Amino acid sequence: MSWNQVFLYRSPAEVPAASREHQGGKEAIPLASRLLWDGRLWEAEVQDTTVVLRPESGAVFTLTLEHFQRLVNVGEIKSERLETPSPLRDSTRDILSHAGPKALEAANRRWGEILAYTRGEAITVTARSIQNWMAAFRRAEAESGCGYLGLLDQVARRGNRTERVSDASKQLLEEFLTTHYAVPQAKRASAVYRLYREECEQQGITPIGERTFYRERARFTSQEVTTLRRGKRAAYASQPFFYSLDQTTPRHGERPFALAHLDHTELDLVLVSSITGKPLARPWATFMTDAYSRRVLACYVTFDPPSYRSAMMAFRLCVRRYGRLPQELVVDQGSEFGSVYFESLLTRCLVTKLDRPPHQPRFGSVVERLFGTTTTEMLHQLRGNTQASKTPRHMTQEVDPKRLAVWTLERFAARLSEYVHEVYDQMDHPALGQSPREAYAQGMELAGSRSHRLIPYSEDFLMLTRPSTATGTVNIHPSRGITVNGLHYWHDSMRSALVSGKSVPVRYEPFDMGFVYAYSGGQWLECIADAFAQVHGRSEREWNLILDEWREQQRQHSQKRVTLNGPLLAQFLQKLQGDEALLLQRQRDLEEQAQREAILLKTPKAEKTREVPPLVELDLTKISRYEEYR
């Protein structure tokens, strides 16, 4: 049948049978199926009059639709199922993966010439070249099962690659690099080469050339060599790092709450007192960030410098919002993260601590990036930010942050929480391609809810996060109760002779020294300080300032250590009314009181209304009359 003739059928049912008869019993292969050709698996895609073949390894190849069907008819191209394993050997796949674009392009061009030669079409090279390529194709097909390898050029293997440096010269070179180059003196490479060449001349050894020396020196230089020459910090620039992210680096951690980062920063904002309106200080913020979704798990603001108390509050806020804690936590080498309390808290909450290496700031870029984003996008838009104080020579009264400050800690903490949990949480992240909230929801759906990791935010959890004393236990005295942090505490159950003299576990709330908790009789008992009126509402940090002042006075007067009691404490605190450090700490604690009570599930007690006595009507007729006194 010529090109201008077509088949006509009486009904559609006759078309498949007639087509199979015309194709000599060969069934046409769908062009989108998985194909096996030349020992490789291919995926075919039809484009008008051509078929694009994409191999599992190598460059894309294009055939005409007619030639493709001819290869199918003769059985060179076979249809395979999607689950068919790759027939390529590891060595063949390695060669194809290391072939450059130019080598693959040349191989495709040679294969096109071979196909044109076999069809009798015009060719652009000599027939002898094509015959050589066909022979190489068959030889590679017989050896590796993939004839395409025979069409790849071997330019990279040209030349004499045998090593011409003697073993003695190579051994002497390595010795000089070790003893003269990898040393703290950091000798220049040219000086080391001169020493090496002189030693070779003295021993009668042929030295290597200068270009070869520099090539060997570059190969010899490693992380350890840089550390020996310039120190650990200089070598850190070329060291690979983990547990760190930037705005554009990919996420790590296989699911939400698998890995989190915890760190503190001093914010670039001056806050004022809600009572006096005068500037207090720059606050500290503690952030806990999920590494997988970049979601902020907790954000705590305080005037106190970094301590275990900030980490404790971050844990409480995380459980309060999400009802769980991360499985692994990345922290730096801060002293607060190495304390016994913090280690005990992680152990009780089943959290694994991962320490960042010291003097390597890139490992902290997860929270550092969040710090930078918060500073530029929020803090720098507020009155009282410290941008002007970065250049004190240029700062004037008009731009002084302390004169412009208007934010109180309570108001600012609420706005910062709103920013990280509502604004930042819904902003598209460049490394995720979606917002942290969307990434978190998607990750939880894929990984599951893991209900066994849920932690109810209750008094039991708050007790779990409270610190203990250095020994962890105290002895119960039948008349004085227990002594914690220099104060006596009492509970009515301590009168019993059954508990007198016993050692019981104890914990305290670091933001209210008026109470401690002793575990006796199978429950935690809330014990009240004998100096409750003086210490109620005072934080542990303020109490430590008081104790330091007390001990200093005892030391100056050569007195023995005296345990503070109610009357003594009242007299002492009266003397400290003008102490500047104590007043400042007291004022800061008052600013944070509302925020802490909200976290501790405490509600401010309503003031009792004074009962107004009922009105009494006076009846003058019932009043007794007395005689006049004379």
Image: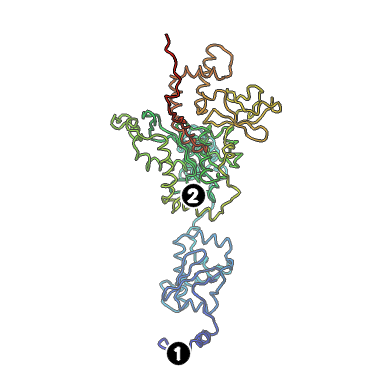
Q: Residue furthest top?
A: 630
Q: Mark 1, residues whose alpha carbon is within 10 Å: few (<14), some, or many (≥20)?
A: few
Q: Nearer the viewer, residue 489 or 492?
A: 492
Q: Quadrant of residue 328?
A: top right
Foreground: disc 2 or disc 1: 2
Left or right of 459? Residue 270 is left
Q: Nearer the viewer, residue 535 or 234?
A: 535
Q: CA distance from mark 2 to mark 1?
A: 62 Å
State the quadrant of the N terminus.
Answer: bottom left
Residue 126 makes an appearance in the image: yes
Check if mark 2's residue and mark 1's residue have beta carbons within 8 Å: no
User: How has the structure been colored for display?
Assistant: rainbow
Looking at the rendered structure, the secondary structure element under dot 1 is loop
Q: Which residue is mark 1?
A: 8
Q: Position of residue 21 (x, y in %)?
A: 53, 87
Q: Position of residue 445 (x, y in %)?
A: 53, 55
- Reply above or below: 233 against 247: above
Instruction: Tell me the amino acid under the disc marked 2.
Output: Ser
Q: Residue at 45% across / 90% down in the picture? A: 8
Q: Which residue is mark 2?
A: 293
Q: Residue at 42% across / 50% down in the picture? A: 426
Instruction: Tell me the amino acid under the disc marked 1.
Output: Leu
Left or right of 613? Residue 394 is left
Residue 198 makes an appearance in the image: no
State the quadrant of the C terminus.
Answer: top left
Which tag, 2 or 1, sits closer to the chain's start?
A: 1
Looking at the rendered structure, the secondary structure element under dot 2 is loop
Q: Mark 2, residues whose alpha carbon is within 10 Å: few (<14), some, or many (≥20)?
A: many
Q: Position of residue 61 (x, y in %)?
A: 46, 69
Q: Nearer the viewer, residue 363 or 329?
A: 329
- Reply above or below: 213 against 521: below
